Amino acid sequence: MKTLAWHETLELHEILAATTYYLFKLKSHSKQITDKELKELYITSFEKLENQIRDLLKK
């Protein structure tokens, strides 16, 4: 298993924090959406962001 350098670890942490924040904001705003197509876009975004977070946590 490869060990990350400190700057790589810091960058990974920043990416993970930003992605988590965007996911939280999308989910909190999605409750107010009534348009079906826009809601589907939000759900797709949730799934993609959640997958990105899972991938980042594997590293």
Image: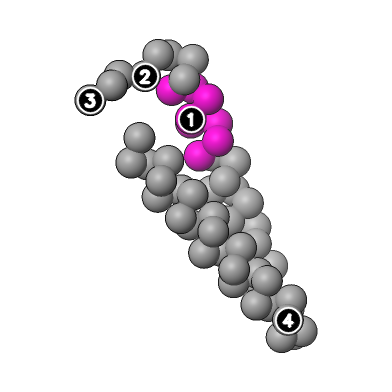
Residue at 35%, 35% in the rendered image:
59
Overall secondary structure of the magenta stretch?
Answer: helix
Q: Quadrant of residue 17?
A: top right
Q: Magenta part of the protein: which range?
A: 9-16
To which residue does mark 1 refer? 12
Q: Amino acid under label 4?
A: Glu
Q: Is residue 46 magenta?
A: no
- Left or right of 47, for residue 1: left
User: Which of 13 and 1 lies nearest the eye of the viewer?
Assistant: 1
Q: Amino acid under label 3?
A: Met
How far apart, in angstroms, are the residues tagged by discs 3 and 1?
Answer: 16 Å
Q: Quadrant of residue 3?
A: top left
Marks 4,3: beta carbons within 8 A: no
To which residue does mark 2 refer? 4
First-in-chain label (1 vs 4): 1
Q: Secondary structure at mark 2?
A: loop
Q: Could you classify mark 4 by the number of other residues whose Cα lies within 10 Å: few (under 14), some (14-19), or many (20 or more)?
A: few
To which residue does mark 3 refer? 1
